[in-house]
Structure formats: structure tokens, C-alpha cells
Amino acid sequence: MKYIATLALKNGMELAENVFDYKNKVILKEGVIIDELSISKLERYSIMTVLIKEPKDYATTRFEKMHLDDQYRKFEDEYKNNLNAYKYMINQFIEKKEPINIEYLLQIHDNITKYAKSGEQLLDMLYNMLPSEDDLTYAHCLNAALISHVFGGWLSLSKEDVRILTLCGFFYDIGKITLPNSLIWSPGKLSDFQFNWMKTHTTIGYDLIKNQKIDQHIINATLMHHERCDGSGYPNHLKDEEIDLFSKYISIVDAYVAMTSARIYRKSKHAFEVVESFIDAGVEKYGSGIIWPILEHIAQSQLGRKVLLSNGFEADVIFINKMSLARPLVKMGEEVLDLYKNPEIKIVAIL
């Protein structure tokens, strides 16, 4: 909503509040659609400005509201420009062996994140991004770099370690860029042959950057980001301490990005679904001491948000259950509902 001078009003605009005369009598009601007659009436009563609804006032979903926000639009423009720069740099490296400028990669991070006031806002903005089909793999890596920086802060890593983790995000999935999109982003279940082919992106990525003059953690992350602490990962079925610590970090980032990125064939998971998915998969696979602080931050970032419940009611998130992060306390009108004690009710959307 914004105030518009009566002289600047146009037919079709909608009043956002009642308009009163000097005797406090309503002369035009909220919701009136502006026409020549209403403009004449405002002028007759010497009303200088009125509150008018804007496009974002008609938005009903968080996605619609986000895409009408001026700050988000600036972020989106900067993101797209820097995604193109990142894409060009990576392609030049893969196709022509041109060395990657590490400091420029970090500048790409800074260019984009200057439009987010916090890590939580950055994650929210990225959640609403819809890259083109041709850019999916590049956007996945770029998002991973941006989110790695946020998660590194949440884990209280040193400034240098956050820098290394951010670079891990830029590099770790580089092997996928050499594989066809039809394989990487296939909407259906992969055959055994396809899955084994897809898994080669770890060794391909490792071979691409193993001789580059970059931190060893970054090189290890390309090879180990699908390893799991229980030995269930690939390519080498490493366990616990055999896995590079930064590879453990980036494996969490990778799973988070995959779950929160919208695809043609499925919806992205909202924050509480992400937390629940990690817990259902087994936090011990990622290292509970590493992943738990991240899950707590993801859940806590939803405090105060309005959500849609599976019973059809809207509610506000008022408290996060530490023992059940995916099932907070919510308030519906005057009623407080503990979702931990009501497992039949779920959060189906963040509004």
C-alpha cells in the first residue's frame, strides 16, 4: 500500500482504507475502485492524498509476495548477472583449462549477498529463485556456495574456514557440469546404469581440480561430498573420520540445496520438511554434532511465520520444540497447538 496524490490517481486503482471528511464522516469506503466520479469527490472535499493498494497487496502466497518486493528484485537481477559470470568462468575452465580466479568467485558471493540483511533472509530469497533449465547445475553450485557461507557462520567456523567452505560450494559439484542435464535432472527414478553414471561426477570433479592450486579441503569435497559417516555413501564408502570435515559440511549443504530448489517435476520442501527429512534420513549419517546446530537454525528462522496446516487452518509459529524441531507450537486464533503432541497435523506450507 502507498499514499498517492489525488491529482495522480488513475481509474482502476483500489482504496486501501476509508477516506474521511473534516467532520470524520466516511466519503469513500475501503475497497472502492477509483473512477472519475470518486476523483471529483476527493477534489471537492480537498483530500490531498489517499492510500492505494499495490500489486503486492493482492499477493496471497509467499512466492508472489517475494517476487513483488523491490529488494528481492534487486537481489534477483544481481543473482542472474553473477550466475552468468560464474557459468562463463566454469565453462572456460572445463573447456579451455583457463585457471579459475578464486578472488573473483568470492566477489560473486559478495555481489549477491549484499542484498540480504541476514543469512536467514538470503536462504528465503534463494528458496524463491527459479533458474532456467539450462542453468540448473550452475545455480545448484552457486546456491551451495552462498548457503555454505551462511552455514559456516551458524557453525561458528573461523573466517578462513568459512572462506574455504564457500569455495567448496563453488567447486564441489563441478563434475556434474560435464554430464547431460537429462541425466542429472531426470524426473524419474534412474536405472542402475544411469545411477552409476551419475555417481561418476565425484571422480570427474576430483580429476578436474586435483592439480589446481587450491586448498586440499576443496579438492576433497569434490570427491567425498556423497560419503556418509555410516559408510553408506559413495564413491569409496568412507566412514566417520575417514571423511574430510569440509566434505561433511558440504554434504549437508548439498542435500539442503537439493531439497529446497523447485523443479518442474516436484515442489521444493519448506523449512520444517527439510528438518524432518534430515532427521528421517538419520542425522548420524552427516555427523549429529555438525548437522544439529544447522537444523536448529533452520527451524528457529521460522519463528513468527504464518503457516498452513494439514487441517486447513492458518497458524503462527510461536515456539520451536528443541526435541522435535520439525513440529513447533503454533497459534490458531486464541488456540495454541503443540504439533509434537498432535502428529496427525502437519505444516504443509509457509505463507
Image (spheres, helix red, strand yellow):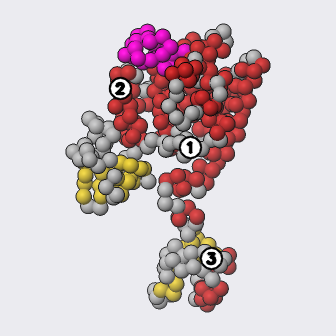
Q: What span is colored magenta in the figure?
A: 223-245
| Residue depicted at 49% across the width and 82% down the height | 29
- Badge 3 marks a residue whose secondary structure is loop
Q: Quadrant of the rendered structure where residue 279 is? A: top left
The residue where tag 2 is placed is: 283
- The extreme left residue here reads 341
Q: Is residue 236 magenta?
A: yes
Secondary structure mainly formed by the magenta segment? loop
Please provide percent x and percent y for residue 81: 70, 40
User: Which sits in the foreground, 105 or 275?
Assistant: 275
Label drawn at residue 66: none
The residue where tag 1 is placed is: 264
Please provide percent x and percent y for residue 195: 53, 23
Q: Amino acid at mark 1?
A: Ile
Instruction: Count every numbered label the image shows and give the total.
Output: 3
User: Which sits in the foreground, 179 or 125?
Assistant: 179
| Residue depicted at 45% across the width and 41% down the height | 269
- Compute the Cα span from label 2 to label 3: 54 Å
